[in-house]
C-alpha cells in the first residue's frame, strides 16, 4: 500500500520490516492532498493557508494523520472521521489561526471498479422497480401487497406511474390491497391524498375504512367524516386521531375559590 504511489516521479514507498514508509521530495501540500484523496479513497479538507506549503520527507505510510504530520514537519490539528468499518473516511487538516470556512475540500474520484459497481447496483434497482410495478399492476394480492411495502422509503424511478397504479389498486377486489393502497398513496402523494381518503371512507369493508382513518391522521375533515361510520372501531380511531390533532387544554392548577 502506497499513500503517494501516484507521485512516482518525485517519491516512492518502501517497506522497513512490517512498517511501510513513504519517501517524498518536497512539493506543495495541495498536490500531496490530491494524491492522498485518490490513493486512500478519502475526503480531505485542508486550510487554505497550507496549500502552497512545501512538504516532503521519509515518513511512515500509516496511520494517515501521522503521515501528514511527518510530511509537514510539525504537529498540526488533524481531525479524522472513521467509517463504520473503522477506516478513515474523512480528514480535516486545520491550521491554527485560520479563519473559519477557509478550507479546500477534495473528494476522491470513483475508480473504474467503483463506477461499475454503482452501475450494477443501479441496474439491479431498476429491475426490482420494474418487477414491483408489474406485480402491482398484474400480480396476485400477495404480490401487490409486497410491491407496495417495498415502495415505502424508496427513491422511485417513475412516481407518476406508481401513483396511477396505486389509484387503480383502490378498486381492487381484495380489501387488503385496497387498504394497503390508500395507506401507501397517502404517504407517497400526501399533498393530493385527501379526495382518495374521502373516497375510501365509503368502502364496503370496515377494515379498509379503518386503514383509511389511520392514513388520514393529518386530515381533520376526513377524520370528522369518519365519526359517523357504522363501525365502532373506525369511529374510535377517528376520534383518537382528532384528539391528537387537537389536544384538550391543560386543566387549571388554580384551585383558589
Image: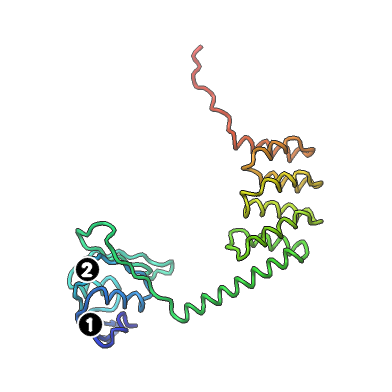
Quarter of the view holding residue 156: bottom right
Comparing 38 with 18, the one in front is 38
Q: How is the image coloured?
A: rainbow
Q: Residue at x 69, y 36 (%)?
A: 224
| 63 is higher (above) or lower (below) than 236 | below
Quarter of the view holding residue 20: bottom left
Residue 244 placed where, x, y %?
60, 37
Residue 148 placed where, x, y %?
68, 60
State the residue position of label 1.
24
Dot 1: few (<14), some (14–19), or many (≥20) neighbours within 10 Å? many
Check whether the beta carbons of the residues at disc 2 and disc 1 lie within 8 A of each other: no
Quadrant housing the N terminus: bottom left
> Mark 2 or 1, which is nearer the eye?
2
User: Please, what secondary structure does the residue beneath circle 2 have?
Assistant: helix
- Number of callouts in the render? 2
User: Please, what secondary structure does the residue beneath circle 1 have?
Assistant: strand
Q: Residue at x 43, y 76 (%)?
A: 110
Side (left or right) of 82 relative to 137: left
Dot 2: few (<14), some (14–19), or many (≥20) neighbours within 10 Å? some
Side (left or right) of 186 relative to 172: left
Q: Residue at x 38, y 69 (%)?
A: 89
| 73 is higher (above) or lower (below) than 250 | below
- Which residue is at the far top? 257
Comparing 73 with 34, the one in front is 34
Residue 170 placed where, x, y %?
75, 54
Q: From mark 2 to mark 1, how far is it between C-alphas?
A: 17 Å
Residue 223 placed where, x, y %?
68, 39
For residue 50, which numbered disc appears in the image? 2
Quarter of the view holding residue 147: bottom right
First in residue order: circle 2 vs circle 1: 1
| 190 is higher (above) or lower (below) than 220 | below
Q: Residue at x 73, y 62 (%)?
A: 144
Amino acid at each position: 500500500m502506497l499513500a503517494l504511489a501516484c507521485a512516482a516521479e518525485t517519491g516512492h514507498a518502501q517497506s522497513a520490516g512490517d512498517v511501510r514508509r513513504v519517501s517524498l521530495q518536497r512539493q506543495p501540500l495541495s498536490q500531496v492532498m490530491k494524491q492522498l484523496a485518490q490513493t486512500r479513497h478519502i475526503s480531505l479538507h485542508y486550510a487554505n493557508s497550507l496549500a502552497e506549503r512545501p512538504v516532503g520527507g521519509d515518513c511512515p505510510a500509516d496511520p494517515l494523520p501521522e503521515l501528514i504530520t511527518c510530511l509537514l514537519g510539525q504537529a498540526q490539528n488533524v481531525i479524522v472521521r472513521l467509517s463504520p468499518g473503522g477506516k478513515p473516511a474523512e480528514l480535516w487538516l486545520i491550521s491554527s489561526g485560520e479563519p473559519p470556512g477557509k478550507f479546500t475540500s477534495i473528494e476522491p474520484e470513483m475508480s473504474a471498479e467503483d463506477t461499475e459497481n454503482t452501475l450494477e447496483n443501479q441496474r439491479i434497482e431498476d429491475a426490482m422497480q420494474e418487477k414491483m410495478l408489474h406485480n402491482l399492476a398484474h400480480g396476485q394480492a400477495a404480490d401487490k401487497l409486497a410491491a407496495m411495502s417495498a415502495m415505502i422509503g424508496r427513491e422511485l424511478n417513475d412516481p407518476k406511474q406508481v401513483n396511477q397504479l396505486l389509484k387503480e389498486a383502490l378498486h381492487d377486489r381484495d380489501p387488503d390491497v385496497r387498504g394497503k393502497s390508500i395507506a401507501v398513496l397517502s404517504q407517497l402523494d400526501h399533498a393530493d391524498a385527501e379526495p382518495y381518503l374521502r373516497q375510501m371512507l365509503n368502502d364496503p369493508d370496515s377494515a379498509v375504512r379503518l386503514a383509511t382513518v389511520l392514513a388520514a391522521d393529518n386530515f381533520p375533515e376526513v377524520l370528522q367524516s369518519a365519526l359517523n361510520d357504522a363501525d365502532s372501531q373506525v369511529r374510535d380511531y377517528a376520534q383518537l386521531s382528532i384528539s391528537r390533532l387537537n389536544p384538550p387544554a391543560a386543566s387549571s392548577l388554580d384551585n383558589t375559590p
